[in-house]
Image (tube, grey):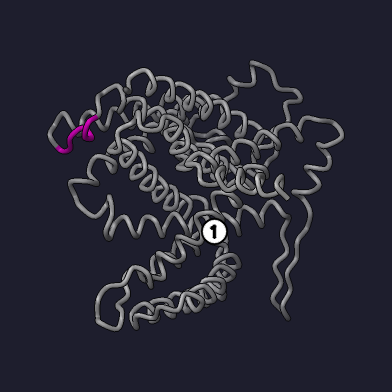
Amino acid sequence: MNFVHASLQALRRFLQMETAGSILLLTAAVVALLMSNIAPLSPLYNKLLATLVEIRVGELEISKPLLLWINDGLMAIFFLLVSLELKREMLEGQLSKISQVILPVIAAIGGMFTPALIYISINGISSDTLNGWAIPSATDIAFSLGVLALLGGRVPTSLKLFLMALAIIDDLGAILIIAIFYSGEHLYFAPLFLALIAIAILFLLNYAHASNLAVYLVVGLFLWICVLKSGLHATLAGVILAFFIPLRVKDQDNNVSHSRSPLYQLEHSLHPVVAFGIMPIFAFANAGISLTGLSLGSLFEPIPLGIILGLFIGKQLGVFGFSWMAIRFGLARLPDNSNWWQLYAISILCGIGFTMSLFIGSLAFTQEDYMNQVRLGVIVGSLASALLGYFLLRMHSK
């Protein structure tokens, strides 16, 4: 019994660590990499992800491989959480004041534009691989903040808030990119019409100040099914649902009560589920890259090279360069108690694309050989950004 109690206490302490989610994420990715390259386990790994999972209710049927359930279903929950955080930050957090949001917005724009430009310049205008232009534009909020957490109190709080705001804005940009460029080519208007009805119901619930979270979630599930069937990407349902869930509700004395806020309740409930469940599962399902036939020359293929240079070079140039111009021309100021070296190191950490880059890659390419190149580029680019960013921050922070 003492051993069990001690084990539970150790597990509880681990889950309370700031870096715990990142450690699980990295562990899941390593396990996937190993399973993809160990002969007895590789067929099992591929067969598991290809397993057909079906749900049928009357005439309604959803039948997809397990990999797509993870990418279309679990990632919708991830985007729901990101959008809840974004809404809260915009209404009463780090993004609620113009003075606070100018620098991360400008930095995020540079961090999305420059990597995409580098990828396009390498892959050419008419190339079949051009569709992956958005892959290096993404920043993995969990991993980048996890690396920052490893440095503890060395890093000024203002820089942590800057990175968090930048990553949230970056995720919003990724959501828009997915909606505009990576949704289905063929739209089906019957489910799309039903999705609009679901959105109208969410609007009425919000307008009526309804605070029953279960009602919002039931309508949100119906919305997800409709969006999935319409040809748009199903993760958009999570984004739409988040922006209708109320942040502020009033108690009996007509005072704003955060304890009864549906948004706070849902965000609090989803954080551990996403950090310790959804993100590691996604990493396990998407990070498996077969090293068979790969060599040092594989890094110089157009897709991996575009992603590596986009993440490792494009991100730091875009984030730091646009930040420097914004501060130089008086549009913003350097985060409190920080220096230029620290801001540059944070810009490098933004090159950790990992889960978001892998997700966009899975939308951009369906061919497995292309996806292996995507995984190679994302892993190398993200790892290089994490290591250099960490050591530069450690060198230039007390």
- Residue 389 located within the stretch drawn in magenta: no
Q: Say which residue label 1 marks.
A: 76
Is 395 positioned to the left or the right of 385 in the image?
Answer: left
Percent across and percent down for residue 32 are 70, 37
Q: Amino acid at mark 1?
A: Ala
Is 373 positioned to the left or the right of 92 in the image?
Answer: right
At 54% across and 44% down in the image, what residue appears? 360
Is residue 117 visible to us here?
Answer: no
| Magenta residue span | 331-337
Vertically, is 276 above or below 397?
A: below
> Magenta segment, principal secondary structure?
loop
Vertically, is 53 above or below 141?
A: below
Q: Judging from the image, what secondary structure is the residue with disc 1 in?
A: helix
Is 63 positioned to the left or the right of 272 in the image?
Answer: right
- Using the image as rendered, state which of residue 335 and residue 315 is in the foreground: 335
Q: Quadrant of the C terminus?
A: top left
At 87% across and 34% down in the image, what residue appears? 40
Vertically, is 38 above or below 283?
A: above
Which quarter of the figure has residue 200?
bottom left
Is 101 positioned to the left or the right of 393 in the image?
Answer: left
Vertically, is 226 above or below 35?
A: below
At 77% across and 30% down in the image, what residue appears? 37
Percent across and percent down for residue 378 are 56, 32
Near mark 1 (Cα within 10 A), the count class, few <14, some 14-19 or many ≥20, is many
Percent across and percent down for residue 157 are 30, 38
- Residue 332 located within the stretch drawn in magenta: yes
- Using the image as rendered, state which of residue 252 and residue 242 is in the foreground: 252
- Using the image as rendered, state which of residue 344 and residue 257 is in the foreground: 257
